[in-house]
DNA sequence: AAATGATATAAAGAATTTATAAAAATGAGG
DNA sequence: CCTCATTTTTATAAATTCTTTATATCATTT
């Protein structure tokens, strides 16, 4: 099997060095760009499987790089950001970033996110069945199983669960969720989400107050994980 | 009534053991093959009603087994696969597999899918007799038994019940049901459905107000379960 | 530790969907 | 033409789901 290629766009040399060592030790091919312009060029010439994009670049903002990338690049973009830049992250995710990682990051988590992003490239759509531990979603039958029994979900609950599960491992912002489930007119009704995430957790989680599947990403949105 | 025969083609001994126990306890006759070649031989000699075929076999790929089977075997083939092999699954369905199940599977679902696969066997349609708990549907005689007595169903009631039972375990939308039973012109007449589901429940359910077979899926449609 | 903002939960009211009964229409068989 | 079983309508009651409000809990920052 071919190595997957990761393009890292970041102006901090120590971070670049660290990422190179970590990624290569996990059998990724690494390409490095020290600024936004170089990043865009290398992305076009090498078509990496994943791009790690720092939000604070010297020549242009990470947000602008992301916008330009999104014109033609269809694979995953993971944002890197310092802490306390929540609004930047949400903005980036709303613009179509796949995921984000706050610096400093644990390497285990970094690798996990990259793998999950690559997996999504390969099989973006069109499986009608997912299994997550004791939970099974059968899209073609429109049925959700927990252990050996069928869960009774309302339409909204089902739609929400499917959208989250379809994007397993990835953060979805409040905006993205609201837009998908309730339509563009309801993107400010964050409370809807809280209510329905609550009822969903009661049904799919063994311990609804310590959820293992439907995770809150404070200030950003929710994430579904296996 | 004769037991249905299931041929399991899988090289993993624990899976074989599990399937044998589960299937025999549900009154199926089980034949086992540990590789593709043996599977093809046993399929030809025993003509099973359903074949469970693992995608990853030691001697030849499940896809090739499926291709060879399809030359002469007309009954249902259910593919078994580990997760994350969506492209394999799509390929298998393209080649004519009836259904697929991702490992690990819940036994309840497995049984449901095998039953529904048997029901779909074209050659069985002539003498088809489906049994769900205390309910027996005889397609050729157009007769439905509940416990030991014959139910008197009208044409529409019978058609509706058969269509639902044929799709046991999956939700059928109002649209699908109306289109099938009343034709494309009546797809907005949801009230027809409510009336007939009501009369059907009175006849087939022990407690029509807490149905166990004919389940309402609010806002979507109805589902038949055994 | 207090204050702030974000999230969770419960519960009421509104809106929609479903169930049931019963009346009107249809149509086949005598 | 009449009768009876069946289907189609109509009306209304019951159940469910969605939205909204209120309050409690939790996380983060000072």
Image (cartoon, coloured by chain):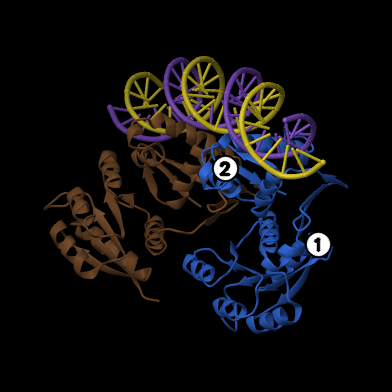
Chain colours: A brown, B blue, C yellow, D purple
Say whether residue A21 is left or right of residue A208: left
Q: Secondary structure at mark 1?
A: loop
Chain of the residue where label 2 is placed in the rendered structure: A
Q: Position of residue B133 (x, y in %)?
A: 79, 49
Q: In front of the other: label 2 or label 1?
A: 1
Quarter-wise, where is residue A108 in the image?
Answer: bottom left
Tell me how far mark 2 sits from mark 1, CA to CA: 32 Å
Q: Secondary structure at mark 2?
A: helix
Q: Looking at the image, can residue B100 be seen? A: yes
Q: Residue at x 49, y 44 (%)?
A: A161
Label 2: how many Cα within 10 Å (few below 14, some 14–19, many 20+): many
Label 1: how many Cα within 10 Å (few below 14, some 14–19, many 20+): few
Q: Position of residue A189 (x, y in %)?
A: 37, 30
Q: Position of residue A175 (x, y in %)?
A: 34, 38
Q: Are marks 2 and 1 on the same chain?
A: no
Say whether residue B67 is left or right of residue B151: left
Q: Residue at x 55, y 76 (%)?
A: B63
In this view, the residue in front, A166 or B149, is: B149
Residue bearing mark 2:
A204
In this view, the residue in front, B132 or B183, is: B183
């Amino acid at each position: 099997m071919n190595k997957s290629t990761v393009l890292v766009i970041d102006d901090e040399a120590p971070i670049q060095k660290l990422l190179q060592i970590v990624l290569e030790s996990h059998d990724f091919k690494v390409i490095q760009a020290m600024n936004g312009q170089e990043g865009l060029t290398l992305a076009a010439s090498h078509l990496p499987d994943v791009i790690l994009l720092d939000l604070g670049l010297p020549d242009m903002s990470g947000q602008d790089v992301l916008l330009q990338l999104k014109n033609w690049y269809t694979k995953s973009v993971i944002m890197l950001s310092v802490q306390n830049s929540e609004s930047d992250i949400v903005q980036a995710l709303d613009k179509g970033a796949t995921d984000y990682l706050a610096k400093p990051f644990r390497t285990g988590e970094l690798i996990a996110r990259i793998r999950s992003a690559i997996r999504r490239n390969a099989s973006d759509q069109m499986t009608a069945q997912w299994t997550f531990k004791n939970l099974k979603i059968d899209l073609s039958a429109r049925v959700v199983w927990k252990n050996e029994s069928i869960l009774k979900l309302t339409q909204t609950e089902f739609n929400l669960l499917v959208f989250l599960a379809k994007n397993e491992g990835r953060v979805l912002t409040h905006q993205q969720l609201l837009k998908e489930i309730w339509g563009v007119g309801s993107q400010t009704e964050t409370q809807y989400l809280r209510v329905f995430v609550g009822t969903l957790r009661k049904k799919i989680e063994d311990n609804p107050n310590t959820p293992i599947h439907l995770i809150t990403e404070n200030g950003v949105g929710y994430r579904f994980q296996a």
